[in-house]
Amino acid sequence: MTQHFIVIGNPIAHSKSPEIHSLFGAQAGLDISYQRQYCPDDAASFTAVIEAFFHGGGVGANVTVPFKQVAYECCAARGGLSEHAKVAGAVNTLLLNPTLLTKGVSPAEALYGDNTDGQGLVNHTKRLDWSLQGARVAIIGAGGAARGVVLPLIEAGIGELTISNRTLSKATNLVNELSHASPAINDKQIQTCRTVDLSGEFDIIINATSIGLSGETLPLADQLNCHYAYDMMYGRELPFLQHFAARGAQVSDGYGMLIGQAALSFERWTGHVIDVVQATETLQAQ
Ligand code: ATR
């Protein structure tokens, strides 16, 4: 029997998720259908669409911009949240809580939220052979994308973490909030600074800002260096990566993170572990 999945967002036409998950389905030998689902940009519409999908037998859904926080609120009030979703304050993967279903709870009330974005990035750095153990890491940006990667990076064993942002108060607020949300984060002394003041030598610098969408470039100090530079954006020219590549760093865009988070969602829904290296090669060849 066909298993049904969707990715819900606004806009959604550009989403690569159907191609990625169709490939995963073929690799796992499963009969799946994975569709793009447009939704008007309001919480009531989101809830109605999601309820209808799961009521109709849907197995899992990915959530993308602008609904990740709405999905978080929805699951917090219903079937629950994973630790990663709780700390991220955002959900990118929806499923039904099986324990609640066996107790006779309706699908709408059993909605459960996970967040695989940050772990997708961590898994990609492993595939790149960039060691996170003990690494000195700097994240640039203090929005939702930055928030989602902090706990997975700490769980991966990084040594030191600095969060820099154009608006310093957002970085300090983020660290305060995250420290309250997770003992593992609270144990870490996270430094904050303005992006223009970020300087020194890091193992990895991660661009988690949305600047790539604007065509502007980040004001980076001349004394800022790293071995590895990672931009969570993909599919466009990334001046951040060009800057560090010119200084001899190894660089990567976020395409591998996209596939990595998708593979973890797929695993969550179906129990099948995806060969991400093979899937990436096939997708890049297409
Ligand atoms: P996302 O969910 O993608 O993280 P967001 O929550 O809107 O989006 O956060 C965007 C991040 O990119 C913020 O850290 C923002 O910096 P500010 O907090 O100072 O706004 C950063 N950002 C966006 N445009 C930027 C720019 N032109 N220069 C520097 N930082 C920028």
Image (cartoon, helix red, strand yellow):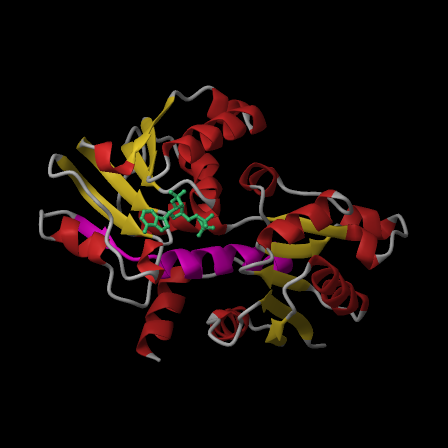
Tell me what residue is drawn at x 88 percent, y 48 percent: 103
- Between residue 182 and residue 57, name the one nearer to us: 182
Report the magenta residues as a range.
250-272
Q: Quadrant of the N terminus?
A: bottom right
- Residue 198 visible (yes or no): no
Question: Does 264 appear in magenta?
Answer: yes
Q: Compared with residue 75, is residue 242 higher up or lower down, i.e. above or below? A: below
Query: Does residue 155 appear left or right of residue 10 in this picture?
Result: left
Q: Compared with residue 220, is residue 17 higher up or lower down, i.e. above or below? A: below
- Residue 30 visible (yes or no): yes
Locate residue 165, reporting x and y percent: 34, 38
Q: Would you identify the image quadrant in which residue 54 lies?
A: bottom right
Q: Compared with residue 223, is residue 266 higher up or lower down, i.e. above or below? A: below
Question: Does 153 appear in magenta?
Answer: no
Q: Quadrant of the C terminus?
A: bottom left
Residue that sits furthest to the bottom in the current view: 286
Locate residue 222, reporting x and y percent: 11, 39
Query: Does residue 157 appear left or right of residue 115 in this picture?
Result: left
Tell me what residue is drawn at x 38 percent, y 54 percent: 210
How many numbered callouts?
0
Locate residue 52, reporting x and y percent: 78, 68
Tell me what residue is drawn at x 47 percent, y 33 percent: 174
Q: Would you identify the image quadrant in which residue 92 lies?
A: bottom right
- Between residue 49 and residue 253, name the one nearer to us: 49
Locate residue 14, reporting x and y percent: 46, 74
Query: Does residue 9 appear left or right of residue 54 in this picture?
Result: left
Decide whether the magenta segment is chiefly helix, strand or loop.
Answer: helix
